[in-house]
Amino acid sequence: MQMPAGEKKTVVLVDDDTEFLEELTRALGDRYEVHASLGDPGTLEVLRGHHPAAVVLDLDLATFDALELLELIHNDPALHDVPVLALSSEEDEAVAERARRLGAADLLVKPFAAEEVARRLERLVDGRARRAPGRLRLGALLVSAGLITQEQLDAVLERQRKEGGRLGEILVREGLVSEEDIVTAVARQMRLEVVDPTEVSPEPAAVSLLPRDFIVRHRLMPLRLREDGSLVVAMPNPLDVLALDEVALRTRRRVVPAICTESAFDEAVDIYYSSRGKLRDAHEEGEEAVASPGEVDAGIIELVDAVITDAAAMNASDIHLEPREEALVVRCRVDGVLHELREFPKDLQAGIISRLKIMGNMNIAERRLPQDGRATFELASGEVVDLRLASIPSLYGENITVRILEVAPLPPTLDELGLSGSNLERFEQALRVPEGGILIVGPTGSGKSTTLYTTLELIKDPARKIYTVEDPVERKIEGIIQTEVKPAIGLTFAQALRALVRADPDVIMVGEIRDLETAKMAADAAITGHLVFSTLHTNDAAAAVNRLVEMGVPRYLVAAAWRCVVAQRLVRRLCVHCRKEESLGADRWEELGLGPAPRKRIKVYQPVGCAKCFGTGYRGRVGVYEVMAIDDDLRDLIATGGSTLEIQRMARAKGVPSLREDALGKVLDGTTSYLELLRVTV
């Protein structure tokens, strides 16, 4: 949204790439007053003259040391509080760490879109990463406390400008104050608790909330969770608002800082996280330890419960526990995308894996072979969810995947699924006919099961008998007979389907057509007076027809049995609390590969990220559909050997939109972003 000129905040771009400067200026010009500098010795004066709300600094300047400039900005009294977004051409952790130590508030690694720079800037400028105004800086605080004189401070600041380093470290090194003096002064000024993280053992539930690299990078240590759910963290620099905001965003908890000395923090990290620390002692012989059921203590149980609870709260579909060389990393899949949730010290790995295997009735002593398990878990709300567990051996221990079933509620209507316009009309028409087949197609994770379950909920009726055959049963639906296949005892899709057609069904749902026998039996049921639903793995609706033919189903049977084929994908919904309006020109629209521009300027929305969407910019998913009703013309074409391309062309001629066209409509109405369209459609 364009702001009145008088309300615009100033941003200075420092880069010697003039083309990139022009692109950034265009991307930021609607929101900010943008000034550019090519990065030379006069840049500092430019910054002082404008006193910007933020600076974008390319670390790869050809004619000037950008890190030196970053240090000058950080140490300049007039610019000390200005957040700097640093841009780097390579993912070098050493460069990134040095940039952060020299004052960079955020770091972006190339390549990236100008829109991503705009999103990062908005977060910095709008207050989350700004240092709190009106609070005394460390030097002034120590002077006011009588610990050093103004002359001593000025001399140390001058040395800092020349040599770099943290002010507190230089003061301690010069013998002017002790670490304890600094901690006491800051604690008194800010009314903070003073802690020693080496003596106060952090609670496992608190430590597990943040991964090691985050803790080391932001220099804070989770200590404990209060009764109100807030998180207490120990940190040498409680004035670091950026770090505190990042913790709050990542953990979705109120964060309470406590202060500790630099040396105590470093020692605590070495104790609890370093490969050199005592937590590695149990693993020095190289063989992964195995915890027996009796060794899985209450702390481990609490950790596992917290992981499942947090993942369920985020509506995650899967939890991945991934052993690495130095840690156990936990990631969860939210809206189809994996996000790192936590990182556990390596010594907790055996207990956590054993706890999950015990929950799933798996053999905890068997670590060489893959295993499957099942469990139920009661959430804090009282809701009970089903879990499916799978283990697989890996280089650094067993990898465990937990599928969470029945967390997100089903969409109450077909339009909530994402069906709209002519797609919705064709699908509803297919449902009104009491016999024939409806096939839902798409890759794994495209939402086929959700579409089927929502449809069954909508059509179930006391006057109808509905059966399902599934592997596994992912949701329990009241009033429907659900059967789970068990190949180990010979209960396959085909065998279950053979039994169901003799059980007086009105509606049959076959979870997936995997073989010729199942495909032919489903088709036979569809032409003998039953309404049949099933799924298939193909890219689009037209391809489903020939996939069945390739399986061995006669063309005449495919044409006669299936009345509607629905192809689908899932795109992430933009978070309505933080999405940002953007105007794209026709040229830019076509450059992105979005097809012919519908008009000269196109209004779209882009993801930003806030606490409500866990910083992703998206919240939930919606379906993108292609609904192909098989009428007499298409039936004749299928029966006479029409190719996938011919079937597709006839469907388009009859007004069936492609997946991309349906996704485009959701971009234009603000439901999703064009980035999502490009991600899931071709």
Image: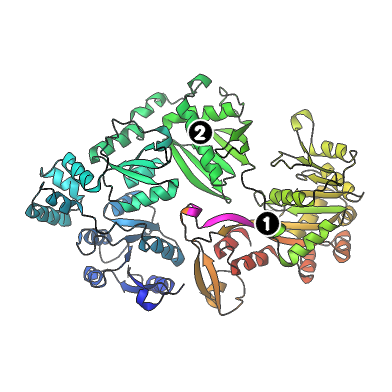
User: Could you tell me how many numbered marks the image carries?
Assistant: 2
Circle 2 — which element? helix
How crowded is the residue under tag 1: few (<14 C-alpha within 10 Å), some, or many (20+)?
many
In this view, the residue farthest toward the front is 228
Front position in the image: 620 or 486: 620
In this view, the residue farthest toward the bottom is 600
Is residue 532 rendered to the left or right of residue 604?
A: right
Tell me if I can see residue 561 in this picture. yes
Looking at the rendered image, the quarter that the C terminus falls into is: bottom right
Is residue 449 rendered to the left or right of residue 602?
A: right
Magenta segment: 612-623
Toward which corner of the image does residue 505 lie, by quadrant?
top right
Q: Is residue 578 above or below residue 318?
A: below
Q: Residue at x 61, y 40 (%)?
A: 404
Residue 69: image location, x then y, percent:
24, 62
Front position in the image: 496 or 529: 529
Q: Which residue is mark 1?
A: 417
Disc marking residue 395: none
Front position in the image: 39 or 602: 602
Q: Residue at x 57, y 47 (%)?
A: 315
Circle 1 — which element? helix
Q: Residue at x 49, y 23 (%)?
A: 291
Q: What colouring does the structure picture have?
A: rainbow
What amino acid does circle 2 point to?
Val
Residue 479: image location, x then y, percent:
78, 42
Q: Which residue is mark 2?
A: 304
Tell me if I can see residue 396 in this picture. no
What amino acid does circle 1 point to?
Leu
**In the rendered structure, which disc, 2 or 1, sits on the residue that comes first in sequence?**
2
Measure the alpha-carbon separation of dots 2 and 1: 32 Å
Is residue 240 on the magenta stretch?
Answer: no
